[in-house]
Amino acid sequence: MIKEALLIIDIQFDFLEGGALAIPNANDIIPEILKIATNFKTIILSQDWHPKGHKSFASSHPGKKPFEQIEWHGNKETLWPDHCVQNTKGAEIHPELLALNPKVIIQKGTDLEIDSYSAFFDNDKKKKTGIDLWLKDHQIQKISICGLATDYCVMYSALDALELNYEVSVLTEACKPVNLNSGSLALIEMKNKGAKF
């Protein structure tokens, strides 16, 4: 029997209603995720966990505004409002998700110099978070992914999981995008690379 896990991406206060980087209607998916989670024995949460002054914050680049793009480490990177700063309320995972008793909480974006949308790698693909090793140790081959946001952390986590040869399902009813248009493009990209919905 194929062992599977539910990977829930970044259900943190800064991405929810009233947060520093609130995603439209993000709170609506929490009941959906809680319902889905009853079907899984293995639940993993990811948590954006940025040090203060992280280089992905617009505030770290004088004269730049959130959502502007810059060249950084040879890549085009989007600048964000300060969000999910370590040990702040905004970085906390919603308590209803913590009550699911996750087996692991993977923290990402912890390196001051590089962002990490994916729960598997930083954006440069130079450092792993450790989740791949944990999944392999537990013989998990299939991952269902949901959470925030479809067009960033969900998509990059799904694409990396596919690249690492996991069978991937994206639970679209339990995801929300930062932007509807890029959310639709993200779904096409994930489907083209082999994700199921």
Image (tube, helix red, strand yellow):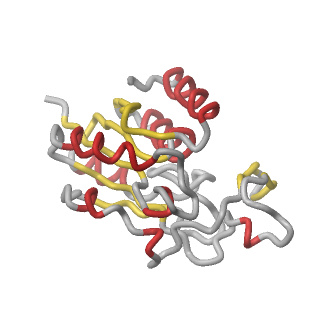
In the rendered view, would you say 121 is above or below 14? above
Residue 112 image offset from top left, x and y in percent: 62, 72
Task: Give the quarter of the figure containing the C terminus.
Answer: top left
Residue plotted at (78% across, 61% down): 65
Residue plotted at (48% across, 75% down): 86
Viewer-proximal residue, 103 or 83? Answer: 83
Residue 95 image offset from top left, x and y in percent: 28, 64
Residue 40 relative to residue 193: left or right = left
In the rendered view, would you say 112 is above or below 181? below
Residue 46 relative to residue 103: left or right = right
Residue 114 image offset from top left, x and y in percent: 63, 62
Viewer-proximal residue, 171 or 6? Answer: 171
In the rendered view, would you say 166 is above or below 113? above
Viewer-proximal residue, 188 or 106? Answer: 188
User: Which residue is the extreme one toward the right?
Assistant: 63
Task: Give the quarter of the figure containing the N terminus.
Answer: top left
Residue plotted at (62% across, 68% down): 82
How many marks do you count on the picture? 0
Residue plotted at (68% across, 66% down): 57
Residue 136 image offset from top left, x and y in percent: 28, 46
In terms of image quadrants, where is residue 5? top left
In terms of image quadrants, where is residue 145? top left
